[in-house]
Every structure is written in C-alpha cells, then in structure tokens.
Image: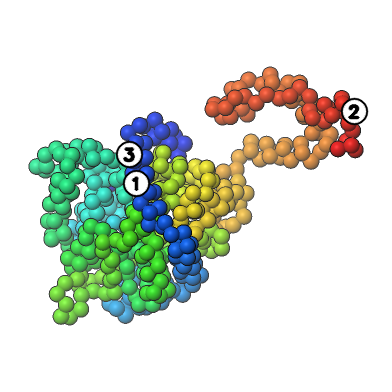
Amino acid sequence: MAVEARTSDFGGKARVALNDPKLRANFRRAMDGLMSKRAAQFSDKEEWTALRARGAAVRARALARLPELLEQLEAKLTANGVTVHWAETTAEANAVVLEILQKAGARRVIKGKSMVTEEMHLNAHLEANGIRAVESDLGEYIIQLAGQAPSHIVMPCIHMNKVEIAELFAARIEGQPYTENVDELTAAARKALRDRFADADAGISGVNFAVAETGTLVLIENEGNGRLSTTLPPLHIAVTGIEKVLEKLDDVAPLLSLLPRSATGQVVTTYVNMISGPRKPGEKDGPKEVHLVLLDNGRSRVFCDTELADTLRCIRCAACMNHCPVYTRVGGHTYSFTYPGPIGKILTPQIEGLDCAGDQPHASTLCGACAEVCPVQIPIPDLLARLRTEAVHPTSIAVKGGGSGRSLAESLGWGGWTALYSSPLIYRISTRLLGLFGNLMPACTPMLREWTRIRSKPKFAAKSLHELARERGFSNDER
C-alpha cells in the first residue's frame, strides 16, 4: 500500500477532484443512500436526543479519567493474559508490532479493518521487512489491490464504482474473469482470502472500544473477516489509539446502538466480538497469544487542552463526513492523510501539526451539519474555528505547529486595519483616497486576485456615507 504524503495540498487536490465527474457521481450516489438510511434509523427525535446525550456522556466521562482508566485497562488485560505495549509514536508502534511478529516467526499476516494501522502505515513497514500483510475487509482488500489509501473511514473504497472494481479484479486476481455482478465479485474476493485466513501466522486488528473495568477489547464488523482474523491465527495483535478506552462494560451498549446506525444505517452490526484474553486450556479455538498496542501519536497532547480534547470523543462512525458538503464533493483522498472529512479536519492538524495540515480547518463551510449528526456531540465547527485561530494566534502549547499560518503580510494587513479603524483621522483620509483612486486598482493585484477570481470586483463609492450626510445638512451630533 502506498504511503501517504506527509504534507497537505487540499486546495490543489480539491480542484482536481471537482473536475472529475465520475468521482463526484460515485460519492453523490453513495452519500445520498447513507444519509437516507441514517435518517430512517433516527426518525424518533426524542430517542435520538436522549441516546446521543448518553453516548456523549459516556465518552466524556472516559476521557475525564483517561490516564487512570488506561492504567486500569493494562492491569485487567495483563491479568487476563494479554500483553500490553505502549507506543508514543507511529514509528514506535510499528517497531513493537514488527518485533512481536519476528519473535513469533510470523511471515504471513491477515489484517482486519483498522484506521490506526493506516495511520501508522503498518502494511508498508511490514512489507519493507519481508512480512506480507493482506487486508481481509472487502473494502480494504479492494484498495490494497489498487495500491490506494482508504477514502472513507467506514467504507474505504466508496470512491470506486462496480465497473472500476470489476476491472481491478480481472487485472489483479489470477484467473478472475471480468464481471460486473456484485455477488460474483464478492465471491471472488472471498475465495482469494480463504486461503489467507487458513495460512496466516498472525492476525492484526483494530479496536472499537477497550473496556477498563473488565479488560475487554470490543470489535464490531459486518463480514466475519474480523472474527476470522482474531480467532484462526495463533497470534493476535490488536492496535488502537489511547482514546478508545471506556470505563465500564455497560458503557458499550449505547455506543453499539449509536455507531452502526450513524455509520451505515443498520440497527446493529452483524458481528460484535468481545476479546478478553488468549485461548484458555480446554478451549478449542482462539489465538494462543494476544497483544494490545496502545498508540499515543499526539493524542495525549490533544487531551491536555480542555476544549480540543472533545476531538477524542470520536467513535469513528463517519456520519460527519457523510453529511459534509465539502467531503461529498471532493472525496477522501483530497485530505492527504488517514482521516478525511470534518473529523479529519480537526484531528489531523492536531496530530500532524498545523504546519503540515493547517489548510484543512479552512476546508469547511462551517455549516454545522457535522455537529448536528455527530452521535457523541463533538462541536466540530467550534473546534475548526479554534484551530484557525491557533494557526495565526497560538494560545496553547498543546497545539502542534501553532502560529505557522501567520505571515508578515497578514500581520501588517491586520495592523493596518487596526490603525485604520482606531483613528478617525486616518479613517477619513483612507476612505477619501479609496473613493478617489480605489476603482483604478486592476483586478489582478494581489489584494484582489483571489476575490475577483470568482466574484465581481468591488466598486468603491465616490463619497462616503458621512460626506453624503454632511451634504444634506446632517452633522455627527444629529445621528
């Protein structure tokens, strides 16, 4: 799988995406379906409001006790026979996973769906060290064959239609004839993956929730591939961000109701897997060895800011991106990093730094659609506005790359604006000069170029309102 770029060029990629009619049609068709299915699931507004408030409270309570709960989780998992590893960076997490696999002599790995491993670029790291990791989720398998990154955090290949997938399978799966029949394409992927499950030396998965009270890893999925990845191989490695911890097992229930309904419009996912340890004596299946890798990668820094810590409530349902007018028109690959859409626009700049992804908080209309559908009440528009401010006027050391968006020209411009509007004399002189000479400025000047690219050039009045008032006999005292 190709490694993503580490700098953002949202504007340039967005222009390319907007001129791709096939891409836009694929997203429009998919998003219309997802939005209607979700709306049908939450038709009872009172139930939605109450369940959403409970989900938000569950996540907020867990985050309020995050350090304590992580220690409790480690203790419970260790008592259950699970080995817990801590990684501050993605490089450390990759090294931990590689060491576990090498120690076990594993050469063939089957992977369940995991956005954190995408964040780590784990597949590329393992392949560089002679270990082939095959994605078992159908969508992830498709984009792995295509050599692409996911464009959506729930449906990785949502940017592709069945014709593109049919062409890909015919080209990349040995002996597969061209067919646009969806059932036949699914069967072809299943056939190709079955041997991978049976031959795998190790399975790698993500984690939806990690319960501190019982030391339980909760995984949800629809295809059964996740269960096979965590059960058949003798070694299971789970990888998750530190924010996924929950306080109690009872906290899982409201989130299990919110997540699939928000994500795919399902009442519940097909499979809910709860893993509390390796195979015990007398049990007939399950891995002999289970490891959990807890990744920080900037999350503890986000946690230190009381406002921005709300970012960590996310349960990865993707409802925000399904309803985002920007994401649905430009697609996930425009965002350059692992997490696209509204949640990506607040998470990525904090993890990677505003100096790398500072343009993403600006890729929003601030319409609030994301906040309206978020099942755990993350105030995404407020956090976008906060990050925009941090880019030019840093107020918190918790924000990586704060102030990187500030330029000398902008500082001088706002300094001039302040002087203009704080001095009546300067204001009168400036407005008089603009009335006399402002309309002589060509539209291509740096001051007007971006504005006039899609708008009419502003026209300055020959006389100010104050001048017109004085001509009609009104003084400032007669307002």
For the image, the number of numbered tags is 3
Q: Is residue 473 left or right of residue 192?
A: right
Q: Report the amino acid beneath label 3.
A: Asn
Real-space Cα separation, disc 3 to disc 2, in angstroms: 63 Å
Secondary structure category for the residue under label 3: helix
Mark 3 or mark 2: which comes first in sequence?
3
- Residue at (44%, 63%) from the top-left corner? 47
Q: Is residue 442 left or right of residue 225?
A: right
Mark 2 or mark 1: which comes first in sequence?
1
Q: Position of residue 361 (x, y in %)?
A: 51, 46
Q: Position of residue 455 (x, y in %)?
A: 57, 27
- Residue at (43%, 36%) from the top-left corner? 14
Quadrant (top left, top right, bottom left, bottom right) of the C terminus: top right
Check residue 307 in the rendering and tell me which mark sits there, or answer none. Answer: none
Foreground disc of the pair 3, 1: 1
From what the image shows, is residue 284 above or below residue 3?
A: below
Q: Position of residue 166 (x, y in %)?
A: 19, 39
Check residue 26 in the rendering and tell me which mark sits there, or answer none. Answer: 3
Closest to the observer, 218 or 250: 250
- Identify the residue position indicated by label 1 in the image: 33
- Identify the residue position indicated by label 2 in the image: 473
Q: Is residue 155 left or right of residue 437?
A: left
Secondary structure category for the residue under label 1: helix
Secondary structure category for the residue under label 2: loop
Closest to the observer, 420 or 91: 420
| Rendering quarter of residue 423 | top right
Q: Report the amino acid beneath label 2.
A: Gly
Mark 3 or mark 1: which comes first in sequence?
3
Q: Position of residue 73 (x, y in %)?
A: 38, 74
